[in-house]
Amino acid sequence: MSSNHLENHQSTTSAPTPAVDVVIMAAGKGTRMKSRLPKVLQQLAHKPLLQHVLATAEQLHARSAVVITGHEAVQVEAALSHLPSALPLKFVRQEPQLGTGHAVQQAVPALEDDGVVVVLSGDVPLTQADTLHALIALCAGQHVALLTLDMPDPTGYGRIERNGDAVRAIVEHKDATPAQKALTEIYSGIMAVPARLLKAWLARLDNKNAQGEYYLTDIVKFAVQDGVRVLAHTITDAVQVAGINSPVQLAELERAYQHRLALALMEQGVRLKDPARLDVRGVLACAADVEIDINCIFEGRVSLGEGVKIGANCVIANCSIAAGAVIHPFTHIDGEKLGVAVGTDARVGPFARLRPGAQLGADVHIGNFVEVKNSILAKGAKANHLAYLGDATVGERVNYGAGSITANYDGANKHRTVIEADVHIGSNCVLVAPVTIGAGGTVGAGSTITKSTEAGALSVARGKQVSIANYQRPAKKPKD
Ligand code: UD1
Ligand code: CA
């Protein structure tokens, strides 16, 4: 490796580093997934496999990505066109699918001559950018660089035949002699090749082999014939080159991905009660001293401030939780597009539900079976039991009683409820919006409030209690 780096250095001081163009093979059928959804659109951590590959390509600062589609091409292309991507995407079709070499042949018209082509597969989602950077450096704009791996059981893979440091050939499993089958170094399916050379070699491929396919791996043979060096960058982390062909493999890679993420969080100082029982399906940003109990799922963008504690079995999506807040077990938060904000030192749950637009100030308490949607709760407001706050503005220190609800929907339109500071709403009240409860006011238990109330007033809106002394309940008549 060190001698390659030297050469590298010498060749790149005079010439500028070549641009990188990524080719992603995504035409295969994926029969073993037994799914209507094309394999490359199956989800890992809530993102299509292909999106993981594209994200890696973006990290390479690639000039372009050429995606080769075939099976369910229309669906795959449509799904990708909807994704946000900093990378210019080109699609080429491969119909029928006659092998990996034939696949890359279809990309030739979309590739510039002056770049380095990095070949990836749409069903290999967890390759790391630094691995590919090393591969590109090894290619150095002039060699063929192959990503390889030692496998205890190499069955099915292309074997690397070496001649010292240099690679002599890749032999496909089905074409291999017993001696070649005994080789354990395999080709991962990922390579970096100067575009100009790749194009020339692709034009020379044939399908005279055991599978009757055009093998991309045959370019190694041509490179050797033409005196171009073929080098291998060997890694030990099999997860980075693992492809997905079945639901079992998809689940295995999901766990591998989650494990990698959990380790990274712990390295930052996050305390996970059990790294095997955490799922992050998006981006989770954590400040210092965050604690997360078991079986929590984080989706979309979630940020947790310093000292935040998340209890067991919470599902939290698109939400920012400020320092010192505690989310008790079994709480469900989903901010969707509007987001949810939980203020400093707030307490939420157990069994609470925060929906889009819930904005809780500092020291707010939301208790069990309380639902909050599109509502702003100022500092110190409390709704501790069995309540609904929808489209409400709630002032500081308000106490919102058990079983109370805002009736925010008249069957056609939504209306706002304003509860000013220091109001006390008794239990089991209905606040029929639009309505304002004046500051410091009290609403008696069981009231249905349809008109706004004055500051400081006690408002009671329910049938008056009547008590009849010595009341005799009806008795059962004797049977005939
Ligand atoms: C290929 C390599 C093999 C390597 C292995 C690593 C060849 C000839 N062999 O094996 O050396 O060890 O990958 O996994 O390249 N695809 C197309 N069009 C096609 C054929 C395949 O787009 O006509 C796509 C598939 O969808 C897949 C990728 O290319 O994403 C690799 O194809 P696959 O059949 O899995 O690889 P192998 O040929 O088995
Ligand atoms: Ca194949």
Image: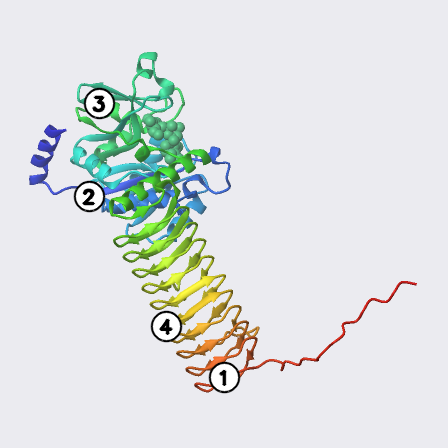
Q: Kindly report which numbered mark, 3 or 1, lies closer to the viewer in this rendering.
A: 1
In x, y percent, where is residue 347?
Answer: 38, 62
Sequence-first disc among 2 and 4: 2
- For the residue marked with disc 1, what is the amino acid? Leu
In x, y percent, where is residue 314?
Answer: 42, 52
Residue placed under numbered mark 4 in the picture: 378
Residue drawn at x 26%, y 55% as measured from the top left = 287
Residues at marks 2 and 1 touching, judged by CB atoms closer than 8 Å: no
Residue placed under numbered mark 3 in the picture: 167
In x, y percent, where is residue 252?
Answer: 40, 35
Q: CA distance from mark 2 to mark 1?
A: 74 Å
Q: Kindly report which numbered mark, 2 or 1, lies closer to the viewer in this rendering.
A: 1
Residue placed under numbered mark 1 in the picture: 458
Sequence-first disc among 3 and 1: 3
Q: Kindly report which numbered mark, 3 or 4, lies closer to the viewer in this rendering.
A: 4
Please state which of residues 468 and 389 is positioned toward the viewer in this rendering: 468
